[in-house]
Amino acid sequence: MTNWMEKLNDDPLPWLLEADPENPGVRYLAFKDLLKLPEHDPKLQEAHKAVMKSGPIPVILENQDQAGWWDRPGSGYYPKYTGTVWSVTFLGQLGADGDDPRVRAGCEQILKHHQAPCGGLSFDGKNSGMIQCMQGNLCAAMIDLGLLDDERVKEAIDWLARSVTREGIAPAEQRKAEVRYYRSGNSAPGFNCSANDHQPCAWGAVKTMLALSKVPEDRRTNAIQDAIEVGVEFLFSRDPASADYPMGYSEKPNRSWFKFGYPIGYVTDVLQILEVLTALGYGGDPRLENACELLLSKQDEQGRWKLEYTYNGKTWVEVEERGKPSKWVTLRAMRVLKESD
Protein backbone atom coordinates (compact mmCIF):
# COMPACT_ATOMS: atom_id res chain seq x y z
CA MET A 1 0.00 0.00 0.00
CA THR A 2 1.13 3.52 -0.74
CA ASN A 3 0.15 7.09 -0.04
CA TRP A 4 -3.03 7.41 2.05
CA MET A 5 -3.44 3.62 2.23
CA GLU A 6 -0.35 3.48 4.42
CA LYS A 7 -2.17 5.57 6.99
CA LEU A 8 -4.85 2.93 7.59
CA ASN A 9 -4.71 1.48 11.09
CA ASP A 10 -5.46 -1.95 9.64
CA ASP A 11 -6.72 -3.53 6.41
CA PRO A 12 -10.54 -3.80 6.46
CA LEU A 13 -10.78 -5.48 3.05
CA PRO A 14 -11.17 -9.06 4.41
CA TRP A 15 -14.07 -7.78 6.54
CA LEU A 16 -15.74 -6.26 3.47
CA LEU A 17 -15.29 -9.45 1.44
CA GLU A 18 -16.74 -11.86 3.98
CA ALA A 19 -20.14 -13.39 3.24
CA ASP A 20 -22.76 -11.27 4.97
CA PRO A 21 -26.45 -12.04 4.35
CA GLU A 22 -27.48 -8.78 6.05
CA ASN A 23 -25.42 -6.60 3.68
CA PRO A 24 -24.46 -8.73 0.66
CA GLY A 25 -24.10 -5.65 -1.52
CA VAL A 26 -20.87 -4.71 0.25
CA ARG A 27 -19.15 -7.91 -0.88
CA TYR A 28 -20.38 -7.48 -4.44
CA LEU A 29 -19.29 -3.84 -4.71
CA ALA A 30 -15.96 -4.55 -3.01
CA PHE A 31 -15.25 -7.19 -5.67
CA LYS A 32 -16.37 -4.78 -8.38
CA ASP A 33 -14.90 -1.47 -7.23
CA LEU A 34 -11.93 -2.39 -5.04
CA LEU A 35 -10.65 -5.61 -6.60
CA LYS A 36 -11.89 -4.65 -10.09
CA LEU A 37 -13.00 -8.18 -10.93
CA PRO A 38 -14.14 -8.47 -14.56
CA GLU A 39 -17.84 -8.55 -15.30
CA HIS A 40 -17.93 -12.28 -16.05
CA ASP A 41 -15.87 -13.38 -13.06
CA PRO A 42 -17.78 -16.17 -11.23
CA LYS A 43 -17.14 -14.61 -7.81
CA LEU A 44 -18.56 -11.30 -8.93
CA GLN A 45 -21.61 -12.90 -10.52
CA GLU A 46 -22.29 -15.05 -7.47
CA ALA A 47 -21.99 -12.03 -5.19
CA HIS A 48 -24.39 -10.05 -7.36
CA LYS A 49 -26.99 -12.82 -7.22
CA ALA A 50 -26.70 -12.87 -3.43
CA VAL A 51 -27.64 -9.18 -3.34
CA MET A 52 -31.11 -10.02 -4.65
CA LYS A 53 -31.69 -12.90 -2.20
CA SER A 54 -31.07 -11.38 1.23
CA GLY A 55 -30.41 -8.08 2.96
CA PRO A 56 -32.16 -4.76 2.27
CA ILE A 57 -32.96 -5.13 -1.45
CA PRO A 58 -35.49 -7.99 -1.14
CA VAL A 59 -37.28 -6.06 1.61
CA ILE A 60 -37.55 -2.95 -0.57
CA LEU A 61 -38.87 -5.05 -3.45
CA GLU A 62 -41.38 -6.84 -1.22
CA ASN A 63 -43.00 -3.46 -0.58
CA GLN A 64 -43.30 -2.63 -4.28
CA ASP A 65 -46.67 -2.70 -6.00
CA GLN A 66 -46.96 -5.05 -8.96
CA ALA A 67 -47.31 -2.00 -11.20
CA GLY A 68 -43.79 -0.92 -10.21
CA TRP A 69 -44.41 1.91 -7.74
CA TRP A 70 -43.90 2.18 -3.99
CA ASP A 71 -46.39 3.59 -1.49
CA ARG A 72 -48.62 5.36 -4.03
CA PRO A 73 -49.07 5.43 -7.83
CA GLY A 74 -47.95 8.33 -10.00
CA SER A 75 -45.19 10.70 -9.00
CA GLY A 76 -43.41 9.33 -5.98
CA TYR A 77 -41.07 11.80 -4.34
CA TYR A 78 -43.30 11.63 -1.28
CA PRO A 79 -43.45 10.18 1.24
CA LYS A 80 -39.86 10.46 2.27
CA TYR A 81 -38.13 8.00 2.23
CA THR A 82 -40.36 5.22 0.98
CA GLY A 83 -41.77 6.66 -2.25
CA THR A 84 -40.71 5.46 -5.68
CA VAL A 85 -37.98 8.12 -6.06
CA TRP A 86 -36.26 7.01 -2.88
CA SER A 87 -36.76 3.30 -3.42
CA VAL A 88 -35.12 3.44 -6.85
CA THR A 89 -32.34 5.69 -5.54
CA PHE A 90 -31.54 3.29 -2.71
CA LEU A 91 -31.76 0.20 -4.96
CA GLY A 92 -29.05 1.74 -7.12
CA GLN A 93 -26.84 2.54 -4.15
CA LEU A 94 -27.27 -0.89 -2.56
CA GLY A 95 -26.16 -2.77 -5.68
CA ALA A 96 -29.45 -4.10 -7.08
CA ASP A 97 -29.50 -5.99 -10.38
CA GLY A 98 -30.97 -3.65 -12.97
CA ASP A 99 -32.00 -6.60 -15.13
CA ASP A 100 -34.45 -7.79 -12.49
CA PRO A 101 -37.98 -7.10 -13.84
CA ARG A 102 -39.08 -5.51 -10.56
CA VAL A 103 -36.15 -3.11 -10.51
CA ARG A 104 -36.69 -2.25 -14.15
CA ALA A 105 -40.40 -1.63 -13.46
CA GLY A 106 -39.43 0.84 -10.73
CA CYS A 107 -37.16 2.69 -13.14
CA GLU A 108 -39.97 2.81 -15.69
CA GLN A 109 -42.20 4.46 -13.09
CA ILE A 110 -39.57 7.17 -12.64
CA LEU A 111 -39.21 7.78 -16.35
CA LYS A 112 -43.00 7.76 -16.85
CA HIS A 113 -44.02 10.06 -14.01
CA HIS A 114 -40.94 12.19 -13.27
CA GLN A 115 -39.49 13.10 -16.67
CA ALA A 116 -40.42 16.66 -17.55
CA PRO A 117 -41.09 17.87 -21.13
CA CYS A 118 -37.63 19.47 -21.20
CA GLY A 119 -36.05 16.06 -20.53
CA GLY A 120 -34.97 16.53 -16.93
CA LEU A 121 -36.30 14.63 -13.94
CA SER A 122 -38.61 16.56 -11.63
CA PHE A 123 -40.73 16.11 -8.52
CA ASP A 124 -43.93 15.78 -10.52
CA GLY A 125 -43.01 15.53 -14.20
CA LYS A 126 -43.29 19.29 -14.76
CA ASN A 127 -40.52 21.65 -15.86
CA SER A 128 -41.05 23.73 -12.72
CA GLY A 129 -40.27 20.87 -10.33
CA MET A 130 -36.62 20.18 -11.05
CA ILE A 131 -33.98 20.24 -8.34
CA GLN A 132 -30.45 18.98 -8.89
CA CYS A 133 -30.03 16.83 -5.78
CA MET A 134 -32.95 14.65 -6.82
CA GLN A 135 -31.95 14.63 -10.49
CA GLY A 136 -28.36 13.70 -9.67
CA ASN A 137 -29.39 10.86 -7.37
CA LEU A 138 -31.84 9.43 -9.89
CA CYS A 139 -29.48 9.72 -12.87
CA ALA A 140 -26.74 8.06 -10.83
CA ALA A 141 -29.12 5.25 -9.87
CA MET A 142 -30.23 4.77 -13.48
CA ILE A 143 -26.61 4.45 -14.59
CA ASP A 144 -25.79 2.03 -11.76
CA LEU A 145 -28.84 -0.03 -12.73
CA GLY A 146 -27.67 -0.31 -16.33
CA LEU A 147 -29.89 2.21 -18.13
CA LEU A 148 -27.21 4.50 -19.54
CA ASP A 149 -28.16 3.48 -23.09
CA ASP A 150 -31.83 4.31 -22.58
CA GLU A 151 -32.61 7.39 -24.67
CA ARG A 152 -34.76 8.86 -21.91
CA VAL A 153 -31.91 8.54 -19.43
CA LYS A 154 -29.51 10.12 -21.91
CA GLU A 155 -31.95 13.00 -22.24
CA ALA A 156 -32.15 13.38 -18.46
CA ILE A 157 -28.36 13.40 -18.14
CA ASP A 158 -28.07 15.95 -20.93
CA TRP A 159 -30.55 18.25 -19.19
CA LEU A 160 -28.74 17.81 -15.88
CA ALA A 161 -25.47 18.86 -17.51
CA ARG A 162 -26.96 21.83 -19.34
CA SER A 163 -28.77 23.01 -16.22
CA VAL A 164 -25.32 23.67 -14.79
CA THR A 165 -23.97 25.62 -17.77
CA ARG A 166 -27.20 27.27 -19.03
CA GLU A 167 -26.76 25.88 -22.54
CA GLY A 168 -30.09 26.32 -24.31
CA ILE A 169 -31.94 27.41 -21.14
CA ALA A 170 -33.46 30.85 -20.66
CA PRO A 171 -33.36 32.77 -17.35
CA ALA A 172 -36.26 32.26 -14.95
CA GLU A 173 -37.44 35.81 -15.60
CA GLN A 174 -38.21 35.01 -19.25
CA ARG A 175 -41.57 33.45 -18.43
CA LYS A 176 -42.62 33.09 -22.07
CA ALA A 177 -39.55 31.03 -22.97
CA GLU A 178 -40.33 27.40 -23.76
CA VAL A 179 -37.27 26.15 -21.89
CA ARG A 180 -36.15 28.15 -18.85
CA TYR A 181 -35.16 27.97 -15.19
CA TYR A 182 -37.86 28.23 -12.53
CA ARG A 183 -37.80 30.03 -9.22
CA SER A 184 -39.47 26.98 -7.68
CA GLY A 185 -36.51 24.68 -8.35
CA ASN A 186 -33.19 25.15 -10.12
CA SER A 187 -33.49 28.90 -10.44
CA ALA A 188 -30.26 29.69 -12.32
CA PRO A 189 -27.15 27.97 -13.70
CA GLY A 190 -24.26 26.94 -11.50
CA PHE A 191 -26.35 24.99 -8.92
CA ASN A 192 -28.55 27.90 -7.82
CA CYS A 193 -31.58 26.46 -6.09
CA SER A 194 -34.73 27.67 -4.37
CA ALA A 195 -34.05 25.27 -1.48
CA ASN A 196 -30.85 27.22 -0.76
CA ASP A 197 -32.38 30.69 -1.03
CA HIS A 198 -31.42 30.77 -4.72
CA GLN A 199 -27.72 30.48 -3.92
CA PRO A 200 -25.47 27.73 -5.30
CA CYS A 201 -26.30 24.50 -3.45
CA ALA A 202 -23.34 22.23 -2.73
CA TRP A 203 -25.59 19.25 -2.05
CA GLY A 204 -27.02 19.67 -5.54
CA ALA A 205 -23.53 20.10 -6.97
CA VAL A 206 -22.27 16.90 -5.36
CA LYS A 207 -25.26 14.87 -6.60
CA THR A 208 -24.92 16.31 -10.09
CA MET A 209 -21.21 15.48 -10.24
CA LEU A 210 -21.96 12.03 -8.81
CA ALA A 211 -24.17 11.26 -11.79
CA LEU A 212 -21.88 12.81 -14.41
CA SER A 213 -18.83 11.03 -12.98
CA LYS A 214 -20.54 7.71 -13.70
CA VAL A 215 -20.69 8.44 -17.43
CA PRO A 216 -17.61 6.78 -18.99
CA GLU A 217 -15.07 9.31 -20.25
CA ASP A 218 -15.39 8.18 -23.85
CA ARG A 219 -19.15 8.79 -23.70
CA ARG A 220 -19.12 12.26 -22.17
CA THR A 221 -20.56 14.87 -24.47
CA ASN A 222 -19.27 18.42 -24.59
CA ALA A 223 -22.19 19.45 -22.38
CA ILE A 224 -21.27 16.85 -19.78
CA GLN A 225 -17.60 17.78 -19.82
CA ASP A 226 -18.38 21.49 -19.54
CA ALA A 227 -20.67 20.81 -16.56
CA ILE A 228 -18.00 18.71 -14.87
CA GLU A 229 -15.50 21.56 -15.19
CA VAL A 230 -17.99 23.97 -13.60
CA GLY A 231 -18.77 21.48 -10.83
CA VAL A 232 -15.15 20.76 -9.99
CA GLU A 233 -14.37 24.47 -9.85
CA PHE A 234 -17.30 25.01 -7.50
CA LEU A 235 -16.43 22.12 -5.17
CA PHE A 236 -12.86 23.40 -4.94
CA SER A 237 -14.02 26.97 -4.33
CA ARG A 238 -14.02 26.08 -0.62
CA ASP A 239 -11.94 23.65 1.39
CA PRO A 240 -14.07 20.48 1.14
CA ALA A 241 -13.11 19.64 4.72
CA SER A 242 -14.90 22.74 5.98
CA ALA A 243 -17.85 22.47 3.57
CA ASP A 244 -18.62 26.14 4.09
CA TYR A 245 -20.32 26.51 0.73
CA PRO A 246 -23.08 29.13 0.32
CA MET A 247 -25.67 28.61 3.06
CA GLY A 248 -28.98 30.12 2.09
CA TYR A 249 -30.79 29.77 5.38
CA SER A 250 -28.02 29.17 7.88
CA GLU A 251 -24.87 30.75 9.23
CA LYS A 252 -22.92 27.49 9.64
CA PRO A 253 -22.49 24.41 7.45
CA ASN A 254 -25.06 21.72 8.05
CA ARG A 255 -23.71 19.21 10.59
CA SER A 256 -24.63 16.36 8.25
CA TRP A 257 -21.58 17.25 6.14
CA PHE A 258 -19.43 15.72 8.88
CA LYS A 259 -21.49 12.59 9.59
CA PHE A 260 -20.79 9.71 7.25
CA GLY A 261 -23.65 7.38 6.40
CA TYR A 262 -25.37 5.07 3.91
CA PRO A 263 -27.52 4.94 1.87
CA ILE A 264 -27.56 8.61 0.94
CA GLY A 265 -30.58 10.79 0.16
CA TYR A 266 -30.50 14.47 -0.78
CA VAL A 267 -28.26 15.15 2.25
CA THR A 268 -24.59 14.57 1.58
CA ASP A 269 -21.27 14.51 3.44
CA VAL A 270 -17.60 15.38 3.00
CA LEU A 271 -16.91 11.77 2.10
CA GLN A 272 -19.18 12.05 -0.94
CA ILE A 273 -17.26 15.13 -2.08
CA LEU A 274 -14.15 12.96 -1.92
CA GLU A 275 -15.88 10.12 -3.77
CA VAL A 276 -16.96 12.44 -6.58
CA LEU A 277 -13.67 14.29 -7.01
CA THR A 278 -11.53 11.15 -6.86
CA ALA A 279 -13.82 9.46 -9.39
CA LEU A 280 -13.23 12.45 -11.68
CA GLY A 281 -9.47 12.04 -11.39
CA TYR A 282 -8.61 14.55 -8.65
CA GLY A 283 -7.53 12.02 -6.03
CA GLY A 284 -4.00 13.39 -5.86
CA ASP A 285 -5.03 17.04 -5.75
CA PRO A 286 -3.47 18.78 -2.72
CA ARG A 287 -6.72 20.66 -2.19
CA LEU A 288 -8.20 17.40 -0.87
CA GLU A 289 -5.56 16.95 1.81
CA ASN A 290 -7.63 18.32 4.69
CA ALA A 291 -10.70 16.32 3.67
CA CYS A 292 -8.61 13.17 3.48
CA GLU A 293 -7.17 13.85 6.90
CA LEU A 294 -10.72 14.23 8.22
CA LEU A 295 -11.64 10.93 6.60
CA LEU A 296 -8.66 9.09 8.06
CA SER A 297 -9.22 10.58 11.50
CA LYS A 298 -12.58 8.83 11.71
CA GLN A 299 -11.26 5.27 11.32
CA ASP A 300 -11.01 2.94 14.31
CA GLU A 301 -8.11 0.67 15.26
CA GLN A 302 -9.25 -1.94 12.74
CA GLY A 303 -9.34 0.57 9.87
CA ARG A 304 -13.14 0.70 9.92
CA TRP A 305 -15.57 3.62 9.84
CA LYS A 306 -18.74 4.03 11.89
CA LEU A 307 -22.23 4.70 10.61
CA GLU A 308 -22.86 8.28 11.78
CA TYR A 309 -25.88 9.22 9.66
CA THR A 310 -28.80 6.93 8.86
CA TYR A 311 -32.34 6.85 7.51
CA ASN A 312 -33.20 3.89 9.71
CA GLY A 313 -36.76 4.16 10.96
CA LYS A 314 -37.77 6.19 7.89
CA THR A 315 -37.24 3.66 5.08
CA TRP A 316 -38.56 0.22 4.18
CA VAL A 317 -35.59 -1.46 5.85
CA GLU A 318 -32.88 -0.63 8.34
CA VAL A 319 -29.28 -0.75 7.10
CA GLU A 320 -26.67 -1.41 9.81
CA GLU A 321 -26.73 0.39 13.15
CA ARG A 322 -25.80 3.96 13.98
CA GLY A 323 -22.63 4.27 16.03
CA LYS A 324 -21.36 0.81 15.04
CA PRO A 325 -18.61 -0.02 12.50
CA SER A 326 -20.18 0.20 9.05
CA LYS A 327 -19.22 -1.94 6.09
CA TRP A 328 -20.96 0.51 3.77
CA VAL A 329 -19.14 3.59 5.03
CA THR A 330 -15.86 1.66 5.10
CA LEU A 331 -16.45 0.61 1.49
CA ARG A 332 -16.99 4.26 0.57
CA ALA A 333 -13.76 5.25 2.33
CA MET A 334 -11.81 2.47 0.65
CA ARG A 335 -13.06 3.56 -2.78
CA VAL A 336 -11.64 7.01 -2.13
CA LEU A 337 -8.32 5.66 -0.92
CA LYS A 338 -7.99 3.37 -3.93
CA GLU A 339 -8.79 6.15 -6.39
CA SER A 340 -6.24 8.36 -4.64
CA ASP A 341 -3.42 5.82 -4.75
Image (cartoon, rainbow, N blue to C red):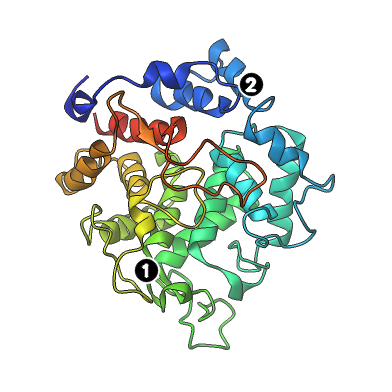
82 to 306, vertically: above or below = below
**Where is the C terminus found, in terms of image quarters?**
top left
Going 56% across and 76% down the picture, which residue do you hit? 179
Side (left or right) of 9 relative to 78:
left
How many angstroms separate mark 1 from mark 2 (CA)? 41 Å
- Residue 321 placement (x, y as % from top left): 50, 38
Asked if residue 233 can be seen in this view, the reply is yes
**Where is the N terminus found, in terms of image quarters?**
top left
**Identity of the residue furthest to the front in this view:** 323
Badge 1 marks a residue whose secondary structure is: loop
- Residue 73 placement (x, y as % from top left): 80, 59
- Residue 26 placement (x, y as % from top left): 50, 27
Q: Give the labeled residue for mark 2.
A: 50
Q: Earlier in the sequence, mark 1 or mark 2?
A: 2
Q: Which mark is residue 12?
A: none
Asked if residue 148 can be seen in this view, the reply is no
Going 56% across and 38% down the picture, which residue do you hit? 319
Three-letter code for the amino acid on which mark 2 is drawn: Ala
Going 76% across and 55% down the picture, which residue do you hit? 71
Q: Give the labeled residue for mark 1.
A: 190
